[in-house]
Image (tube, helix red, strand yellow):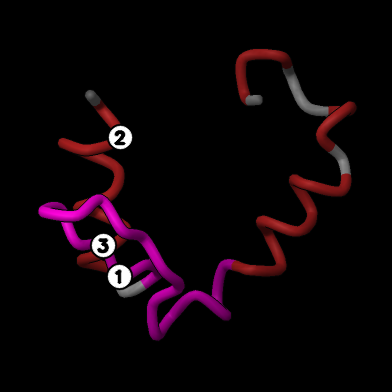
Amino acid sequence: MELFHTHLPKLDDAGFVDWDPRTGAVVRGPRFDAVEPVLRLFADHTDELPSEWV
Protein backbone atom coordinates (compact mmCIF):
# COMPACT_ATOMS: atom_id res chain seq x y z
CA MET A 1 0.00 0.00 0.00
CA GLU A 2 2.71 2.44 1.04
CA LEU A 3 4.72 1.66 -2.10
CA PHE A 4 1.86 2.69 -4.41
CA HIS A 5 0.56 5.63 -2.40
CA THR A 6 3.79 7.17 -1.14
CA HIS A 7 7.08 5.86 -2.51
CA LEU A 8 6.40 5.40 -6.23
CA PRO A 9 4.69 8.78 -6.63
CA LYS A 10 7.62 10.52 -4.92
CA LEU A 11 10.22 8.63 -6.98
CA ASP A 12 8.27 9.49 -10.13
CA ASP A 13 8.00 13.18 -9.17
CA ALA A 14 11.76 13.28 -8.55
CA GLY A 15 12.44 11.69 -11.96
CA PHE A 16 14.20 8.61 -10.58
CA VAL A 17 11.55 6.32 -12.09
CA ASP A 18 8.75 6.62 -14.60
CA TRP A 19 5.69 4.97 -13.09
CA ASP A 20 2.35 4.34 -14.74
CA PRO A 21 -0.16 3.82 -11.91
CA ARG A 22 -2.76 2.42 -14.33
CA THR A 23 -0.58 -0.46 -15.51
CA GLY A 24 1.85 -0.66 -12.57
CA ALA A 25 4.80 -0.38 -14.96
CA VAL A 26 7.97 1.09 -13.47
CA VAL A 27 11.05 1.93 -15.55
CA ARG A 28 14.17 4.00 -14.99
CA GLY A 29 13.48 7.70 -15.09
CA PRO A 30 15.62 10.50 -16.52
CA ARG A 31 17.41 11.05 -13.17
CA PHE A 32 17.99 7.35 -12.35
CA ASP A 33 21.75 7.72 -12.94
CA ALA A 34 21.93 10.02 -9.90
CA VAL A 35 20.85 7.24 -7.51
CA GLU A 36 22.20 4.15 -9.26
CA PRO A 37 25.58 4.15 -7.41
CA VAL A 38 23.79 4.13 -4.04
CA LEU A 39 21.48 1.31 -5.15
CA ARG A 40 24.47 -0.71 -6.34
CA LEU A 41 26.20 -0.16 -3.00
CA PHE A 42 23.14 -1.42 -1.13
CA ALA A 43 22.82 -4.42 -3.46
CA ASP A 44 26.50 -5.32 -3.11
CA HIS A 45 26.36 -5.17 0.70
CA THR A 46 22.91 -6.54 1.50
CA ASP A 47 24.37 -8.95 4.03
CA GLU A 48 25.79 -6.02 6.03
CA LEU A 49 22.58 -3.97 6.20
CA PRO A 50 20.19 -4.06 9.16
CA SER A 51 17.53 -6.69 8.62
CA GLU A 52 14.72 -4.10 8.65
CA TRP A 53 16.28 -2.42 5.59
CA VAL A 54 16.04 -5.47 3.31
Residue type indicated by callout 2: Leu
> Where residue 3 sits: x, y (%)?
30, 34
Magenta stretch bounds: 16-35
Instruction: Please say if the residues under marks 3 and 2 sit with CB atoms less than 8 Å apart.
Output: no
Give left or right: position of 39 versus 48.
Answer: left
- Work out whether 27 lies above or below 54: below
Q: Secondary structure at mark 1?
A: strand
Q: Secondary structure at mark 3?
A: strand
**Residue named by callout 3:** 19
Which residue is farthest bottom? 30
Residue type indicated by callout 3: Trp
- Work out whether 48 lies above or below 52: below
Whether residue 27 appears in magenta in the rendering, the answer is: yes
Cα separation between marks 3 and 1: 4 Å
Q: Secondary structure at mark 2?
A: helix
In the rendered structure, find residue 43 and report the number of the disc placed on it: none
Which residue is farthest left? 22
Between disc 2 and disc 1, whose residue precedes? Answer: 2
When asked about the image quadrant of residue 41, the answer is: bottom right
- Residue ID at (22%, 38%): 4
**Residue named by callout 1:** 18
**Residue named by callout 2:** 3
Instruction: Please say if the residues under marks 3 and 1 sit with CB atoms less than 8 Å apart.
Output: yes
When asked about the image quadrant of residue 13, the answer is: bottom left
- Work out whether 23 lies above or below 32: above
> Where residue 5 sits: x, y (%)?
16, 36
Residue type indicated by callout 1: Asp
Cα separation between marks 3 and 2: 12 Å
